[in-house]
Image (cartoon, helix red, strand yellow):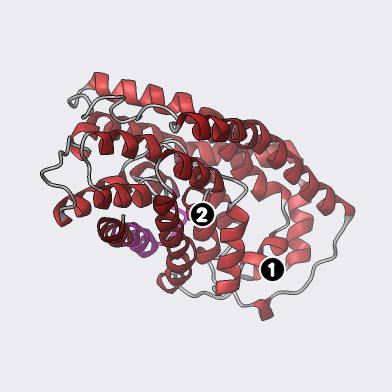
Amino acid sequence: MSQHTGSEYTREPVNKKMIISAVVFVLIAVAGLTYVKWVPYWNKAFDAAVKHSIGASIVSGKNPAAPAPSWTAAWEYAKAYYTSVWKAAVLGIILGSLVQVLIPTQWLLRTMGNASFKSTAFGGLASIPGMMCTCCAAPLAVGLRKKNVSVGASLAFWLGNPTINPATLIFMTFVLSWKFTVLRLVFGLLLTFGVSYFANRFAPAARVPDAIRSYEAEAKAEQSAPFLARWGRTIGTMLLHIVPAYVIAVLVLGAARAWMFPAVGETVGNSLLVIIGFAIAGMLFVIPTAGEIPIVQTMMSFGLGTGPAAALLLTLPPVSLPSLLMISKSFPRKVIWFVAGSVVVLGVLCGIAGALIL
């Protein structure tokens, strides 16, 4: 994938078909997000304000620890997880494929094609209405990379969806504390915009290929094939490359969750080793949107310290083993390792800050 500078672009003629395609994409996105995210989260915000809870922990329910590793534990977790996310997952795959066939390439490159902070910022800001979990946002990140959007911008879009999700921040304020919300927002902004921007340095700088540089010819070629044929090929490729790793990794993590999140009492409190351990576990584990809140609420009720709790609140949402596998073919390996490591490091720092000030 290429990193670009603004001087490489020339404006292609804008025709009615391009505009209609873009409008159709926006309408589908707005309709899908309204049904899957915006309306349900509006209602859930009122529940959070009244009940100071958004449900039981998906890891352990109301118990201090998750069930022992087994096939049953794997299946039960996968069932609970997919029941929660399937609508958003379907929407993510639909939008991730449609962005490749409905949005003109140069329109994306002009706003998010550069290895600059401006492009990264645009990607991060564009993520805010999505409010998707990391796995549901992954197909969109893959779609953006297929359109040659820069590493920084596509990462900011991917990380921003779960990390600076405004609905989650509102739930967190009602259920936990505004102090946790501020801590999550500060470190979430560093992750979404800072880590994404610096990730550009781990992506090889390459010249824009002639096929991409010739925007007018590309636009005509894209529009020559029937829409359904182009969309069918795109969504088929995405399903083949994304779904198997997604399903298997969720099952594995569901079985192993008792090892990743052992019962922790007041005796360990804000131990640095516990903060580090939970930062790593949180980075690997997969949860639905806002699932970190009931997980932390339940664990704190059994004695978890504010330090490990803060670490989990930051590291659980942005990435997971399944989502990293889902995007692994779209980003350089060094970028994947940099992002995963940065999530852990920032999680540890967030945990230390939580232990000191919360």
Locate residue 90 relative to residue 265 in the image: left or right. right
Magenta residue check for 238: no
Q: Is residue 208 visible?
A: no
Locate residue 70 relative to residue 159 in the image: left or right. left
Residue 70 locus on image (x, y percent): 20, 23
Mark 2 or 1 closer to N-term? 1
In the picture of the structure, the residue carrying the numbered disc 2 is: 160
Q: Is residue 228 above or below residue 201?
A: above
Residue placed most toward the observer, 123 or 4: 123
Residue extending furthest right? 16
Q: Residue at x 47, y 62 (%)?
A: 189
In the picture of the structure, the residue carrying the numbered disc 1 is: 110
* Magenta-highlighted residues: 327-344
Specify few, some or many for label 1: CA neighbours under 10 Å numbering under 14, 14-19, or 20 or more: some
Residue 325 locus on image (x, y percent): 38, 46
Residue 268 locus on image (x, y percent): 12, 46
Residue 225 sits in quarter: top right
Which numbered marker is on residue 304? none
Specify few, some or many for label 2: CA neighbours under 10 Å numbering under 14, 14-19, or 20 or more: many
Q: Is residue 78 visible?
A: yes
Q: Residue at x 32, y 21 (%)?
A: 75
Amino acid bearing label 2: Gly
| The C terminus lies in quadrant | bottom left
Amino acid bearing label 1: Arg
Secondary structure at badge 1 equals helix
The secondary structure that dominates the magenta segment is helix
Residue extending furthest front? 50
